[in-house]
């Protein structure tokens, strides 16, 4: 599946710079600038120059647009996460706290484990969005889509290379890899790419947020020991408190079938590999 946009923040910024330098005609208007600053997004004082809010707001918008958040999750945020049970409340509280405590010196990632439909992707995307609002750069990728995108670069007509994709994934402050380890038998190709990503984030000391249906034991069986070892070092383990599938529940607002009981599909025990 294609990425929603191939542009990176860097290319957007480069385009803006090029527009500024346009040799002919009138100087181009900046996409930011306001009455509070010098009109170019800078506030210059005797103490030095700093970015104006208008410039910060502009780049936050650019970073949000470049985060590859799937259209279906565009409206999903902490504010739209409902709390029909205490478990939902617990997971939402944890996610909000994570964002609150996140800083450039406290940026350990998360390995978020839970059954299907319990809100892992919803919360991971909400965290990503909030961190971008805080001024960090971020990217979301479903693992399966990512592998397809990498495979597509092997086509001789492809203009993108695998290196381009990996560079983009390793460049952002926060990377969300969604639905990892879903297949029972994971090919060497997939294991290699996942190791490259985990190791890349590990070496760059950058945040990695992973969601999965597989419990730690299953993950350990499916992934290579050197990947698991790094994953545990850079991610805190978070088991979702919620165990019921929102998709099939009859929680208020849920579109799922209403026949499966008041609490939706509830699975016994820990999540397993699916
Ligand atoms: N508490 C909630 N309030 C509102 N919507 C929710 C809630 N929990 C889940 N949803 C919605 O239900 C759908 C499924 O949630 P989500 O995709 O986050 O589940 P998941 O745990 O990632 O499942 P899977 O493991 O199958 O990927 C999404 O549309 C999500 O926005
Ligand atoms: Mg999900
Ligand atoms: Zn301004």
Image (cartoon, grey):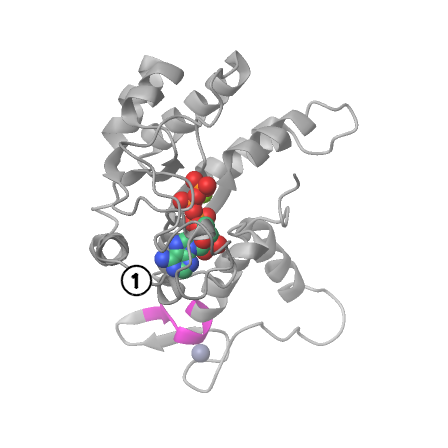
Q: Quadrant of residue 2?
A: top right
Residue 110 location, quadrant: top left
User: How far across and how far down the image is residue 223, in percent?
Assistant: 38, 18
For the view shown, which residue lies furthest in the bottom direction?
A: 35
Instruction: Classify 10 Å Cα crowding around label 1: few (below 14), some (14-19), many (20 and above).
Output: some
Asked whether, in this view, residue 139 is left or right of residue 201, the answer is right
In the displayed structure, 81 sits above or below 52; it is above
Ligand 1 closer than 8 Å to label 1 CB:
yes
Look at the numbered disc 1 and give the secondary structure of its residue.
loop
Q: Is residue 191 visible?
A: yes
Q: Nearer the viewer, residue 88 or 77?
A: 88
**Extent of the magenta region:** 49-56
Residue at 33% in and 32% down: 271
Taking 78 as reference, is 160 above or below it? Answer: above
Drawn side of residue 88 relative to residue 81, left or right: left
Looking at the image, which residue is at 34% across and 21% down?
A: 218
Residue 96 included in the magenta stretch of the image: no
- Viewer-proximal residue among 128 and 76: 76
Q: Which residue is mark 1?
A: 83
């Amino acid at each position: 599946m294609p990425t929603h946009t191939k542009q990176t923040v860097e290319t957007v910024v480069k385009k803006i710079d090029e527009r500024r330098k346009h040799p002919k005609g009138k100087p181009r208007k900046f996409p930011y600038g306001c009455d509070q600053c010098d009109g170019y997004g800078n506030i210059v004082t005797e103490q030095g120059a700093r970015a104006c809010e208008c410039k910060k707001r502009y780049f936050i918008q650019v970073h949000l647009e470049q985060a590859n958040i799937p259209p279906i999750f565009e409206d999903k945020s902490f504010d739209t996460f409902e709390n029909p049970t205490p478990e939902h409340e617990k997971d939402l509280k944890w996610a909000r706290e994570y964002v609150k405590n996140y800083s450039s010196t406290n940026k350990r990632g998360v390995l978020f484990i839970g059954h299907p439909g319990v809100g892992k992707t919803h919360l991971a995307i909400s965290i990503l969005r909030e961190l971008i609002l805080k001024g960090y750069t971020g990217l979301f990728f479903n693992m399966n889509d990512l592998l397809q995108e990498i495979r597509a670069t092997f086509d001789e007509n492809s203009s993108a290379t695998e290196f381009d994709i990996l560079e983009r994934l390793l460049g952002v402050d926060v990377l969300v890899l969604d639905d990892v380890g879903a297949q029972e038998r994971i090919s060497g190709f997939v294991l290699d790419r996942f190791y490259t990503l985990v190791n890349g984030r590990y070496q760059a000391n950058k945040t990695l947020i992973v969601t999965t249906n597989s419990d730690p034991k299953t993950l350990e069986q499916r992934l290579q020991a050197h990947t698991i070892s790094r994953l545990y070092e850079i991610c805190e383990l978070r088991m979702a408190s919620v165990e019921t599938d929102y998709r099939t529940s009859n929680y208020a607002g849920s579109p799922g079938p209403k026949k499966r009981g008041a609490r939706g599909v509830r699975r016994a025990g820990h999540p397993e590999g699916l």
